[in-house]
């Protein structure tokens, strides 16, 4: 059997240039954004911003948002939104606070119960979306108000009328799990480095940076695990397929419903993790905890390369998107700019990311 010499080459084996492959990477825009923002602050900000203490200073809020943003990115790749994630931080913060303070439970019980409660709420979100066929935007918007209101009512119920529950730090002090969710890791290493002049230290010899805040380690761990799941497991293929075309995915044997419910559970559990970390650090919880984080998490995911239509994105992209957010949030304090410019910077980054995802990539790669 002969092959027609004039027939077109099979596109499945067609080689691509390095530039084309690079432009197809969803995290490209976020990495470029990090570079541009870094250059901007190198020019305009005080040099202290890029010392070790300055870097830790902006990575800490980036890590807290990034945990939410990576989970939101996974859900967006799967074709759905979760606008209740910020309110979930407040709601699970309430649950954790009541378990630790009012009921006096140890963290080995309080944290799993908090995560289970979050997973149940996330599953309910996903179940309502699937059963009703309503857009997840509408369903989770409703849960945004439900959970925020439940947090307010619950706090008043368990505190006798206050909107803040205090005493968390005292309740968890001495618990063997506390160092995994609060404080700084590798303190001994940083003291050793300070003694040898490798890192900055105070006159007393104590390091200016006592260690790596644990939320940064959780942030990195979540980025690595989610990236592995997306790129190296069948579940990752299911997530991309579900977000690309859920009907075609279902017809191909992908458990679309289970995938979507699992992703809603992931975002809820990510919110619970942030709640535990921030509540222990602050020593209290309140009804406004996590306020507006749902929008910031989605912005982080979009800056990181997620398409609003689903089926495309990257956990590493959301990782860098969160770093951009943290740099802008804290970086302006090192400059002479008015702090109110923060929202302008954030809006500009979001607009540029959307333009890159929806226009530039179309023209360069021919993708949707």
Image: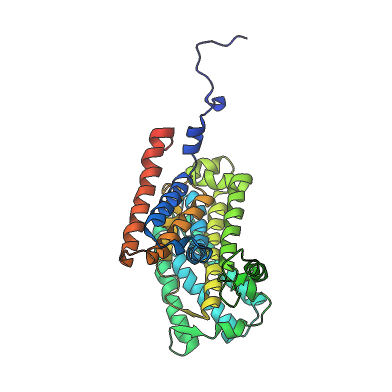
Q: Is residue 90 above or below residue 39?
A: below
Q: Is residue 58 above or below residue 241?
A: below
Question: Quarter-wise, where is residue 296 in the image?
Answer: bottom left
Query: Going 65% across and 68% down the picture, which residue do you hit?
Result: 186
Residue 203 lies left or right of residue 154; in this view the side is: right
* Of the pair 78 and 283, the residue shown nearer to us: 283
Residue 23 visible in the displayed image: yes
> The C terminus is located in which quarter?
top left
- Where residue 125 sits in the image (x, y, percent)? 49, 62
- Where residue 122 sits in the image (x, y, percent)? 52, 63
Q: Residue furthest bottom?
A: 160
- Where residue 249 sits in the image (x, y, percent)? 53, 42
Query: Going 31% across and 59% down the picture, which residue do you hit?
Result: 344
Q: Is residue 70 above or below residue 276?
A: above
Residue 329 lies left or right of residue 264; in this view the side is: left
> The N terminus is located in which quarter?
top right
- Where residue 219 sits in the image (x, y, percent)? 56, 61
Query: Going 52% across and 58% down the picture, which residue do you hit?
Result: 71
Query: Going 64% across and 74% down the picture, which residue do you hit?
Result: 179
* Of the pair 198 and 343, the residue shown nearer to us: 198
Question: Quarter-wise, where is residue 150 in the image?
Answer: bottom left
* Of the pair 175 and 235, the residue shown nearer to us: 175
């Amino acid at each position: 059997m002969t092959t027609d010499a004039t027939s077109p080459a099979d596109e499945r084996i067609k080689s691509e240039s390095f530039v084309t492959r690079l432009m197809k990477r969803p995290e490209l825009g976020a990495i470029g954004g990090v570079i541009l923002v870094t250059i901007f602050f190198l020019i305009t900000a005080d040099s202290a911003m890029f010392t070790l203490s300055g870097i830790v200073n902006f990575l800490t809020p980036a890590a807290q948002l990034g945990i939410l943003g990576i989970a939101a990115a996974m859900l967006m790749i799967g074709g759905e939104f979760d606008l209740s994630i910020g309110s979930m931080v407040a709601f699970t913060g309430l649950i954790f606070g009541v378990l630790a303070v009012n009921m006096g439970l140890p963290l080995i019980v309080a944290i799993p119960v908090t995560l289970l409660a979050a997973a149940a709420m996330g599953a309910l979100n996903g179940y309502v979306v699937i059963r009703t066929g309503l857009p997840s935007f509408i369903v989770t918007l409703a849960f945004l108000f439900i959970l925020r209101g439940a947090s307010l009512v619950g706090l008043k119920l368990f505190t006798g009328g206050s909107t803040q529950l205090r005493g968390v730090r005292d309740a968890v002090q001495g618990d063997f799990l506390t160092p995994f969710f609060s404080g700084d890791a590798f303190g001994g290493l940083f003291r050793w480095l300070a003694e040898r002049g490798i890192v900055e230290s105070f006159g007393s010899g104590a390091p200016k940076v006592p260690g790596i805040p644990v939320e940064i380690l959780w942030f990195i761990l979540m980025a690595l695990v989610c990236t592995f799941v997306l790129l190296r497991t069948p579940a990752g293929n299911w997530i991309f397929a579900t977000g690309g075309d859920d009907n075609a995915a279902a017809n191909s044997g992908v458990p679309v419903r289970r995938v979507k419910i699992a992703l809603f559970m992931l975002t809820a559990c990510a919110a619970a993790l942030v709640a535990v970390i921030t509540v222990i650090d602050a020593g209290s919880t309140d009804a406004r905890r996590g306020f507006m984080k749902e929008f910031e998490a989605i912005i982080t995911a979009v800056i990181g390369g997620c398409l609003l239509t689903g089926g495309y994105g990257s956990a590493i992209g959301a990782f860098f998107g969160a770093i951009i957010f943290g740099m802008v949030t804290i970086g302006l304090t090192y400059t002479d700019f008015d702090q109110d410019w923060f929202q302008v910077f954030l809006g500009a980054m979001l607009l540029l990311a959307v333009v890159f995802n929806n226009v530039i990539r179309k023209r360069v790669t021919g993708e949707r």
